[in-house]
């Protein structure tokens, strides 16, 4: 596709349910990032994938959060036993290669609301 | 040490005016400073970026000014237009792949 695609665009769920968010990066991009954007806050780094290397999970806020990237392409972010404080926009970005000076191309995010 | 402080939180400018957004960082290892622009309902998009070996970078109406000794950098939008109304994020990164983002500035340009 032309850009980073995220689905669903909106998700409303009840507290305690599990949710799965999907990210389709730009074809050929080896680096993939997940961020969380809460109201009035900046982008909070969650996790980073680069090729076949072990992911950097240092930003995941709790063990309820996990992510995987299959075949070096599509990634899913899973939140188990959701809490109200998990409500936020979850953004995915990809770049051609890893590196701070590589432009990150963002999807439009998944807006998650926990009731 | 990892924070990037951005100000103001919000800014209202008249069409044709100059918009100025400021950021300050603490980590002297940072050596890459991008600005991202985000429209409502969309993901951020890279606008312009600078490295500390230059004090200014200009692309069209957008200019980054960088002050290494003060550990500050700013975005100037000249001849601001209503279409520039968006949220702007500064960021900083060092030797690895992580960017630390500011909290954003909501810019409104009135016609």
Image (cartoon, coloured by chain):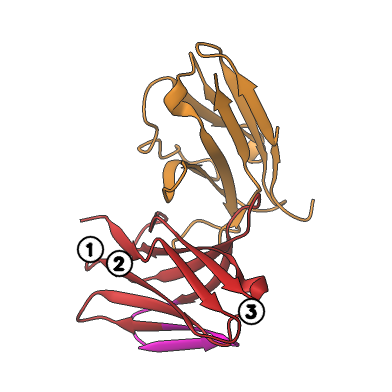
**Relative to A10, B21 lies left or right:** left
Q: Which chain carries label 2?
A: B
Query: Which residue matches tag 3?
Result: B81
| Shade of chain B as shown in the rendered figure | red
**Horizontal and vertical percent for residue B53?**
34, 85
Q: Residues under labels 1 and 3: Cα distance?
A: 34 Å
| Labels 1, 3: one chain | yes
**Subunit ID for the residue under disc 3:** B
Q: Colour of chain A?
A: orange
Q: Mark 1 points at which residue?
A: B27
Where the C terminus of chain A falls, by quadrant? top right
Task: Report whether mark 2 lies on the same chain as mark 3.
Answer: yes
Q: Which of marks 1 and 3 is nearer the N terminus?
A: 1
Foreground label between 2 and 3: 3
Sequence-first tag of 2 and 3? 2
Q: Is residue A84 above or below residue B39?
A: above
Disc 1 element? loop
Rendering quarter of residue B96: bottom left
Q: Do the residues labelled 2 and 1 touch (CB within 8 Å)?
A: yes
Q: Mark 2 points at which residue?
A: B30
Residue B67 location (% of width, % of height): 28, 83
Q: Which residue does the image show at 69% across and 49% down from the upper left? A: A4
Q: Give yes or no for contact between labels 2 and 3 (Cβ–Cβ under 8 Å).
A: no
């Amino acid at each position: 596709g032309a850009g980073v695609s995220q689905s669903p665009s909106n998700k409303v769920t009840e507290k305690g349910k599990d949710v799965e968010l999907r990210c389709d990066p730009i074809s050929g991009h080896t680096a993939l990032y997940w961020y969380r954007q809460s109201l009035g806050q900046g982008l909070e780094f969650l996790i980073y994938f680069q090729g076949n290397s072990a992911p950097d999970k240092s930003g995941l806020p709790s063990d309820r959060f996990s992510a995987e990237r299959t075949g070096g392409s599509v990634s899913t972010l899973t939140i188990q036993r959701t809490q109200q404080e998990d409500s936020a926009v979850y953004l995915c970005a990809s770049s051609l290669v890893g590196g701070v000076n590589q432009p990150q191309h963002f999807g439009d995010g998944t807006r998650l609301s926990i009731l | 040490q990892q924070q990037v402080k951005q100000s103001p939180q919000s800014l209202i400018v008249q069409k044709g005016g100059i918009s100025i957004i400021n950021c300050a960082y603490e980590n002297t290892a940072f050596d890459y400073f991008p600005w991202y622009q985000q429209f409502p309902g969309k993901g951020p998009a890279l606008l312009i970026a600078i490295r500390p070996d230059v004090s200014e970078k200009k692309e069209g109406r957008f200019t980054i000014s960088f002050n290494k000794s003060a550990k500050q950098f700013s975005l100037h939008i000249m001849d601001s237009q209503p279409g520039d109304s968006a949220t702007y994020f500064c960021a900083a990164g060092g030797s690895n792949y992580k960017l630390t983002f500011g909290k954003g500035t909501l810019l409104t340009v009135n016609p």
